[in-house]
Every structure is written in C-alpha cells, then in structure tokens.
Image (cartoon, rainbow, N blue to C red):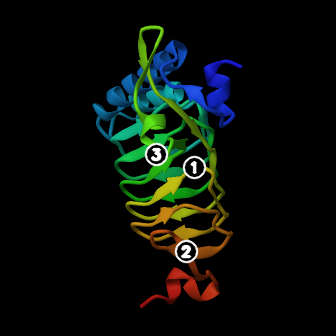
Amino acid sequence: MTNEEKMLAGKIYNSGDLNLQKKLTRAHRLCKIYNDTFDDETQRRQEIVDQLLPEHGENIFLQGPIFFDYGCNTKIGTNFYANFNLTVLDTCPVVIGDNEFFGPNVTLATPLHGLLAQDRNTQVIDGQKTTFEYGKPLTIEDNCWLASNVVVNGGVTIGAGSVIGSGSVVTRDTPAGVLAVGNPCRVVRKLTAADQIKLKK
C-alpha cells in the first residue's frame, strides 16, 4: 500500500511522504487564496472551492477563513453553511451531509498520534524528517447544527438532525435527533416538536 492508501484506510503511515506533502501544499495554497477573497467575489470563491473540494453539492457557503489539510478527502452535501474559521483535518475521509449549519471555529479532526512521546517525535528516514500517525474517518449526517467552537474527533458519527452545543468536544457517536453538549459531549435530551422556533418567546 502507498502512504496515501494507508492514511485513508486509517493505518499508520509516513506523513512525510512526498506525494502527500504535494497534496497538502496544494490544499493549503488554495485555502490561503480563498481566505484572501472578499464575500462578494462569489465566482472566484466558487472556482477555488471547486478545486479544493471536488466532491461538494450545490449551495455551499464558507465564510472564511478556512483551513483544509487535503480537501479532496472531504465530501460535502448540498446547502452547507460554515461560519468563519472552519478547520477540517481530513487525513481520513470526512463526510458532511445535506442542510448543515456550522457556527464559527468548528474543527473536524481525523488525525491521531501516538500517546508515547517516542511515537510522536520527529524521526529521520533516508535523510528526511517525518512523523508516523494514523487517523479515523468522521461523518456528520444530514440536517445537523454544530454551534460555535465545536470540535469533532475522528471515528465519530453525528446522527441526522442533531444539535451540538457551543464549546463541545465530540469524542464518540451521537444519535440522531438530539441536543448534545459538553466536554466530552453528552446527550442532554431528544429534540421534539416543542423545540419549534415559533414557540420561542
């Protein structure tokens, strides 16, 4: 297996692989170009998004600034809104469904590192500095709202229609149709018809 195949499969891989470094550099460059545009430069932004995120649906809006590790490992559905400072570390596949709403400073992080220092530290292989890591994919099903400053760890699935409260750190699967908050994030209750906005004072 190549290092890219290992990375996407969640196996331990060499992050210094030259092919991966080229893809990282390309994605980081596209993010920087996007972040230098203004809100009303819609055509230019669309062109950049098409390059950075080849698997995306219609009507996605990224307020910016944004940061993607690869972009090509992230799939986004239709009607997606992300407020500023969206960070997606997509060393493993990230799947974001339809009709999603992200507040500011949301982070989706698939990479994982060794707990022991000797496993995390930089190594030199064939004269090249590198680290070894692995990851876990994550999925956010349709119709979710991730409020401000939410972090979602790799290996997690957030069920359809759920709301993740501000400042939450999601470390395990969240069922569909619930309000979940906290660090670590825990389910508070099911969402019901009583939560309709028209019933709010």
Q: Nearer the viewer, residue 77 or 43?
A: 77
Q: Residues within 10 Å of mark 2 (few under 14, many from 20)?
A: many
Placement of the N terminus among the 4 image quadrants: top right
The residue singled out by tag 1 in the image is 154
Specify which label sits upstream in the sequence, 3 or 1: 3
Mark 1 vs 2, N-terminal side: 1
Q: Residue at x 38, y 62 (%)?
A: 148
Relative image position of residue 184 (x, y in whole percent): 49, 68
Residue ID at (50%, 13%): 18
Question: Residue 133 has which mark?
Answer: none
> Which of labels 3 and 1 is toward the front?
1
Total numbered labels: 3
- Which residue is painted at 62% across and 30% down in the image? 7
Q: In the structure shown, which secondary structural element does the residue marked by tag 2 occupy? A: strand
- Which residue corresponds to mark 3? 61
Using the rendered image of the protein, determine whether residue 77 is visible from the camera's viewpoint: no
Closest to the observer: 153 or 95? Answer: 153
Query: Which residue was labeled with disc 2?
Result: 186
